[in-house]
Image (tube, grey):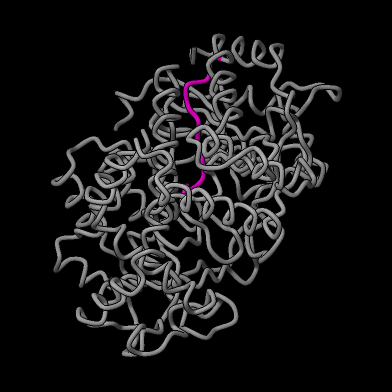
Amino acid sequence: MNGTSLPRTSGILLHPTSLPSPYGIGDLGRSAYEFVDFLAQAGQHLWQVLPLTHTGFGDSPYQSFSAFAGQPLLISPAYLQELQLVSQDDLNSCPQGDPTQVDYGAVIPWKNGLLRKAFQSFQEGRASHLNWDFENFCREQDAWLSDYSLFMAMKDCHEGRCWLDWPEDCRRPDPDKKAALRAELTNESRFYAFVQFLFFREWMDLKRYANEKGVRIIGDIPIFVSMDSADVWGNQHLFQLDTKGFPTAVAGVPPDYFSATGQLWGNPLYDWSAHDCEGYQWWISRVRNQLQILDILRIDHFRGFEAYWAVPYGELTAVNGQWQKGPEGKLFSAIQNALGENLPIIAEDLGVITPEVEALRDSFSFPGMKVLQFAFEDTGESSFLPHQFTTPNCVCYTGTHDNDTTRGWYETLRDDCKHKLRRYLHAADTDTISLQLIRLCLSSTAAYAIFPLQDVLDIGKEGRMNMPGRATGNWSWRFRSGLLTEDLARELRDMSQLYGRY
């Protein structure tokens, strides 16, 4: 994937949880297909989503129980009914709430109960045509599915507690103990494997439909994994942990645009020497898995492969961390040797970027990111201004999931910055800034132009997806059905045609 081969195209950033649905959270059902239809009608050929993984604490897609497992909450209840695993009465019991917000506290127990009902039906012989496909899925995905399903079953046995709080023989089980646990928890483990089978079956149907419509899906993989995950529990030698399994240092970033005290993510850090000794096989498996279910990968926090911010475990902020060297080019060379060159990877290169990070990105021809909101935070020059772009091998965004919506951002911008922005856009006071910034994004020399749906709909701060550093109240925004009109599609298509992206 390099600048000379990237098609000039554009698309929309929207996580599936934000789709309309009568079941409390967006899913992979009818509204997802309708969104693909809208993208095609609007001349957009990219759909960017956030990580599709099984979320844990805080409902963040960047803190998951597994780097491989799919999000059960995205399975459509209507799909379960179509498979004759649940009834209409089961669907009618869905708690009703605000259609513009996900109430995870209500959605999670209801949907988990629905999935258990579906599994019970399957165990009783309903949807028997799925038997062979399910067993084949378990065989093909055993490398990660076996540990994940056992891990989740054990979490249930320990009332959802983090694995660090389990008994010693469960925290660090030897092969005999793990075999005994699998035998003891066969049915519970099988439930979690069945849910994964349903997720990937429904997801791949949607992806095929999108691809047939000329829409490619950009996925997102965080550089780090959650401490409370099957990845760490099952591969403790690959992380910087003490003899009891606790991290010696955790991930974050130093003070930056988003936070004066930095961001303390708390993820365990990789033991890169251990990964090197194993030929980076865990990472190769992770990227291979994602490329099977996505068309393009955006790797979050790319700069961490050159050097990462290590914060001593127990610190309350990220201020007292220090930079440690990452694997640099050795990791991506290993991935290329295993999976081929010209990998479809986008490097999230925001934050504290050094010449070494840029050299690593450019040595593999990975496109970087340009966020237009960053270009107008002051009145000086900025590498995020379109006239400063030095290569088309980049992705231009109006904003990301970590930014306020363009309208919300503009409303809090300093007056002198607002003035510069309007002059740059040739925008009158009556012009909609969200639309004008999308136009600027489309007109840039960047090969890819992407904008959140919130900007397409000109939604204010109430549509913000995530506030970095805020523990609660994130990841819940949804849009109402009926907003994706033919007029809106025509406007986007006309602009995309004008700027050579159709």
- Residue 64 shown left or right of residue 376 in the figure: left
Position of residue 240 relative to residue 17, above or below, is below
The answer to whether 411 appears left or right of 123 in the picture is right
Residues 166 and 445: in front is 166
Q: 36 or 6: which is nearer to us?
A: 36
Is residue 456 or residue 185 the one in the foreground?
185
* Residue 362 in the image, given as x and y percentages of width and height: 30, 42
Q: Is residue 454 left or right of residue 182?
A: right
Give the overall secondary structure of the magenta segment. Answer: loop
Front one among 98 and 271: 98
Q: Is residue 413 visible?
A: no
Spot occupied by residue 240 in the image (x, y as percentages of width and height): 33, 78
Q: Is residue 48 magenta?
A: yes
Count all numbered tags in the image, as a single digit.
0
Is residue 42 at least partly visible in the picture? yes
Residue found 69% across the figure and 60% down from its top: 105
The stretch in magenta equals 43-52
Residue ranking furthest to the right: 430
Q: Residue at x 62, y 35 (%)?
A: 452
Does 391 appear above or below 214? below
Q: Residue at the location (45% across, 24% down)?
A: 210
Give x and y (percent) for residue 311: 47, 78
Q: For the N terminus, which image quadrant?
A: top left
In magenta segment, residue 203? no
x, y percentage for residue 302?
39, 53
Give the residue drawn at x 57%, y 58%.
Answer: 60
